[in-house]
Amino acid sequence: MLGFRLRRASDAPSPSGVTHRSRPAPATRTRARTGSVRRLTAALLPLTLTGLALTAAPSLAASSPADGEAAGFAATGPTALVTMGDSYISGEAGRWRGNSLNNTGSRDGTDRAWTGSTYDPTRVYGTSQANGCHRSDSAEAKSATGTTQELINLACSGATTENVFRSSNGGVAYRGEAPQADQLAALAATKDIKLIALSIGGNDLGFADIITACATDYIVWYSYCNDDQQTVVDTKIDGAMAKVGKAIDEIRAVMSGAGHQSSDYRIVLQSYPSPIPRGAENRYAESGWSRVNTGGCPFWNDDSDWARDSLVPQLADRLKGVAAAKGAQFLDLRDMLQGREVCAKASKQVTGTQQPSAATSEWVRWIDSRSTQGQVQESFHPNYYGQLAQGRCLSLLYAKPSGDFSCRNTAGQGTSGIHLTSVS
């Protein structure tokens, strides 16, 4: 079974019995519940999705070309596409082809790390398994085929914008690696980089804390999380977006310093897809334990609706504004997982008779709070299928030299059904 093996004395109350900010008195907490939330909170803390540092906020105004840009770059090296940023683009959860309750062997074919006798995550994450960057073989960069001669992934799971900035301008090494802009500089000196895709912004907004709070409110406190968490997001988002803007400035400075003119390459800033469906689109009842033990999506309907229709769009709209201010293209992924989310009615779990399929399986890794399968940090990220879909999004955008686009899937189809729609 899934890692959440918690039990209540009785089923959760119906939605009408749940009130915002409702908290039982401390004396009513049972020892079991207290222990469960401690385990849940500790387990969910590694779920850092993306990142930003909340220090001085630079202007979002478009920056002018850096000195020396006119010198030009001698395009003698191979053409390259580079991805930078956090776990939503690094390839976190690429190990999994859907979700299965089977904890043995290949988990009904979902676990790509299964060797036939043991589990070897390096089969998927390569050397990045050791430091936790989790750059999978299905990551967006690796799936953006038909674009450039080389596909290069610098992103790292859990990275913040401080891990993107140049070390000379506030950048911080992460997981034993130099800041990503410094790594980009080494590439830019020898490669004809055509496109740089960036995913960043969620960690400094506290995505991991939001997930923890909402899951805890569902499992333990029987209250909604969205009112408190919206306040947290509103407090942090201005500083976070300023840092995203600085990250783009840092990338441009690196490219200019290597002699690349702004017309030689493109920067694509992308948003985040929602990992959970709306409440009405969840295939498991709101009461009881099926959302926890079977589905791996412990959230109330109201909180699911807030995440899907408020939080994710709010962040996407703000990122779109940053892209416009900085002269970058914008790739909107808010609807990319529609119907393919964890627990979505339009998708199915994998079983012994229902094999993994991009047309029917979930495209997101569920929450496995006890690492019953794999690692907790893989939870709530696009899985193997989701990453192939994101790579398809980027491949299609590569053929669009200008403009902003939304990427969507087609119901009942695999990743070949991914398509772009122009957004104004």
Image: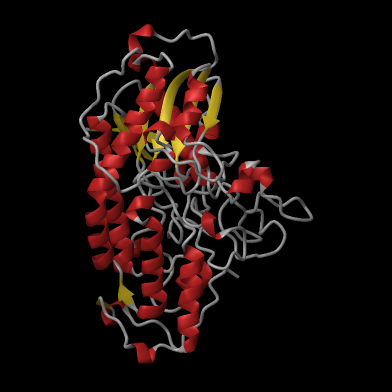
Instruction: Farthest residue to the front: give it.
Output: 168
Q: Which of 31 and 259 is in front in this view?
A: 259
Which residue reaches farthest right? 117
Residue for point 37% across, 92% down: 27
Position of residue 208 measured from the top left corner of the image (x, y, whole percent): 41, 59
Q: Quadrant of residue 222?
A: bottom left
Q: Position of residue 177 (x, y in %)?
A: 54, 39
Quadrant location of the N terminus? Answer: bottom right
Give residue 18's quadrant in the image.
Answer: bottom left
- Examine the image and state in which quarter residue 100 appears: bottom right
Relative horizontal placement of residue 8, taking residue 95 as reference (left or right): left
Residue drawn at x 47%, y 7% is 74
Quadrant position of the C terminus in the picture: top left
263 relative to 121, above or below: above
Which of 335 and 191 lies nearest the eye of the viewer?
191
As drawn, which residue projects farthest toward the bottom?
A: 27
Q: Residue at x 37, y 7 (%)?
A: 71
Q: Is residue 2 above or below residue 111?
A: below
Relative to 354, residue 248 above or below: above
Q: Residue at x 56, y 58 (%)?
A: 99
Image coordinates of residue 136 in percent, x first then y, are 58, 42
Q: Can residue 121 be seen in this view?
A: yes
| Residue 82 in sight in this render | no
